[in-house]
Amino acid sequence: MLIVGGGINGAGLFRDLSLQQIDCLLIDKADFASGASSAPSRLIHGGLKYLETGEFRLVAESTLERNLLLKNAPHVVQPLETILPIHSYFGGIVASALRFFGVSSKLADRGAVISELALTIYDFLGRHARTMPRHHLAFRTRSLRSLPLLDPAIKATATYFDAQVTQAERLNYELVADGLAACEDAAAANYMTVDRVEGERIWLRNLVSDRCVCVEPTIVVNAGGAWIDSVNRSLGLDTKYIGGAKGSHLIVDHPELHAQLRGRMVYFGSKDGRICLVYPFMGRLLVGSTDIRVDDPDQVRCEDSEVDYMLGVLREIFPRLKLDASNITFRYSGVRPLPHSDTANPGEVSRDHVVHVDQLPDTRVPVLSLVGGKWTTFRGFAETVADDVLKRLGHSRRVSTRQEPIGGGLAFPRSPNDRAAWINGLAVRCGIPVERTAALFARYGTTASVIAAFCSPVRGGFDDHPLASAPAYSVREIQYLCEHETVTHLADLLFRRTAIALAGQLTDAVVAETAAIAARTLQWEPARVTQEIDAVRRVARERHGLAIGDAELASTNDG
């Protein structure tokens, strides 16, 4: 098996097939989860809005997969209480009926009757493997007492539960790591691309070393996301499967709103009919999102016009909110790999997944293109594709992934008392302060035991200490990530293996300090260090709106 694309669809399939002991090679032209998989709303949700278009099967699948992820990856997937503001009692009934039957209609008002009906259906469809409470309604006075900044014109609020993924990039990487651990013949390589095809032989080029290697796969899976058609062209196929839509998000610093939300998400309809959201994330607020047609996924940025739009719709639901661009600490954008469609509104394109089957030119080698899908349903999508692949190969399924823990979710202690005992025991064994051990556990789940042992002064005799520029991380922890988690570039470390950039901690000092550790660990020459620092600054500035200063970094090069 050759799987092209190391985002969530490719990583999920790689893990599933590796668990079946299928010889798999996973490649990505950049880093794992560096495309749309690192740019979602970071929700694991059942897709309440899909009810409006009658996609009951997708909602049922999504709610089931949400519930399974809460059990299988509890270290990074956690419940998220969600508030739905309601501005009328009977609004949206006609528009909802038209949308349900496939008639295009703008739905800017979802009244109490429609909301109650939708949430009742939502609870029913999410009954399997349920882990969270059912919904409830509150009228205006009670709602404003709970959230005073909310629009006083509301009639009521509905509260239900979905989930969030706190570290999407880590979950994606853990799927890759699980696949590598499950099958000794499995392999994964970032910064590897399809160079050329010669019959059944596919030449892959390492974009760092510029060396090529030849593989002869029985089956090729194109999990390239927004780049699916581009990958197919490199394989000699002319397809038009993707009609991508850009979604941009903001990380905003607003202590007053953060305090009022108390860990809850507000999920609301804007005046133009879009669904928008805001919820606490890494000590700040995550705000989203836009939905804009794009042709070139490599040129996607969160533009200033999108910033104005998202801040504007946030003020619609919180009219007394004092907020402007100065509150933004991070911005990001990605392209949803939606199926090609002629509809003018990207929001009307189904978020369901589909597989297209072609063949390498002049061969019988099948090429499966995975179109669509989303974070919530990646496991189910991978299971469907894996079953198809197993059938083509004449194999049967050995392991179900339905109850299979992911990464640090393995043997995860479920109760608060059990978690406290686990953390205290690890702290004692490794000679690390309990607070530090708890931070590792929150970040890595039970995989923290391996990292704590690597950092342990008792076990290794190492003098580990916190980073001067980012004390939540330590020198040995950064070294571990560089050595064991396929870190190729400094950006991999700062934007994906850690949450340093996303949490708003990316400064010149952090870049300098982590670059020095990576240089020692990965044996980078001074010129390479300079290139890596420049690349991080460029990504931060161009893609995330971060102005990393031009402080002198010569000491890093000397180190």
Image (spheres, grey):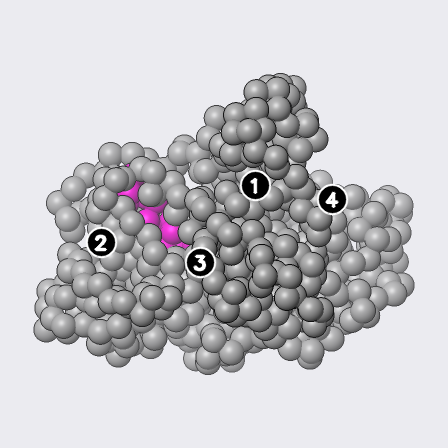
Badge 2 marks a residue whose secondary structure is loop
Is 9 contained in the magenta span?
yes
Q: Which residue is mark 2?
A: 1
Residue shown at 45%/53% (left/top)?
522
What's the distance in space between the residues labelled 1 and 2, CA to CA? 36 Å
Q: Which residue is mark 4?
A: 263
Badge 3 marks a residue whose secondary structure is loop
Q: What segment carries the magenta color?
A: 8-19
Amino acid type for the residue under numbered disc 2: Met
What's the distance in space between the residues labelled 4 and 3, CA to CA? 35 Å
In the picture, measured across the screen, residue 347 lies left or right of residue 365, that is right
Q: Which residue is mark 3?
A: 488
- Near mark 2 (Cα within 10 A), the count class, few <14, some 14-19 or many ≥20, is many
What's the distance in space between the residues labelled 1 and 4, CA to CA? 32 Å
Residue shown at 61%/19% (left/top)?
428
Dots 1, 2 in contact, CB < 8 A: no
19 versus 349 height, above or below:
above
In the picture, measured across the screen, residue 407 lies left or right of residue 509, that is left
Q: Quadrant of residue 79?
A: top right
Amino acid type for the residue under numbered disc 1: Arg
Badge 1 marks a residue whose secondary structure is helix
